[in-house]
Image (cartoon, helix red, strand yellow):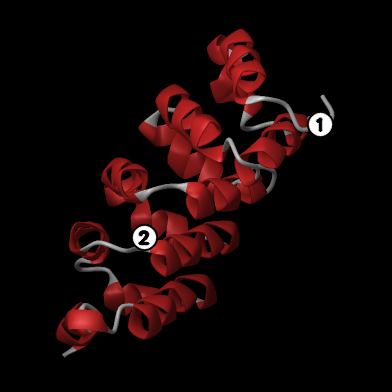
Amino acid sequence: MSPMPPISREQLGLYLDSIAGTLDKVVMEWSGCETLLHPIRGMNGDLVVGRILQAVSKEQLSTMFCDDVAVHLSLGLIERCNTAQRLQILKAIGPCIFRISSSTNGSWVMQAMINNLDSTEEVERLQRGLKGRVAAMMIGSAPSQVLLACASRMRYHSANNFIFREIA
């Protein structure tokens, strides 16, 4: 597979329909990631994001975020998600946020997630996923970068106070 040239929303839908049964495998392959990344960043990115979120299991989503190959697709996915889709992702990966944040690739994805949060519900979901793990996250370089993103990005409404409560 090579990167797709610009195509219409209808053509993209037909293409995604044709690979629907294998989309969960395509997102873990270099050529698949490269093929899907182009339309995610294009005008029809919402269509691709929706299809990926439908096709990928909760477990595979957290694996995808940490994977050397799928990390670029994961970053594009996070950047293109709307609030409801980010919330869906946070619900799916909630129990795995610490593990995801502990890998270099996963920490990049989690930082992108934090930088794109725009609702109180998303912030609360992220806080629940990190509850009881803040002290452990301060030890490693990758997870500490996620905490730093929380501390600097989630300043509104004292959303970053959970960090200080955990270490007090």
Rendered view: 105 above or below 162? above
* Residue positioned 64% across, 22% down in the render: 12
Q: Residue furthest bottom?
A: 168
Q: Which tag, 1 or 2, sits closer to the chain's start?
A: 1
**Disc 1 residue crowd, few under 14, some 14–19, many 20+, Cα 10 Å:** few
Q: Which residue is mark 2?
A: 98
Viewport quadrant of the C terminus: bottom left
Q: Which residue is mark 1?
A: 5
Is residue 130 in view? yes
Is residue 66 in view? no
Amino acid type, label 2: Phe
Amino acid type, label 1: Pro
User: For this view, does 88 lie left or right of residue 125?
Assistant: right
Which quadrant holds residue 151? bottom left
Rendered view: 79 above or below 40? below
* Residue positioned 49% across, 63% down in the render: 112
Calculate the distance from the C-alpha at mark 1 to the C-alpha at mark 2.
Answer: 37 Å
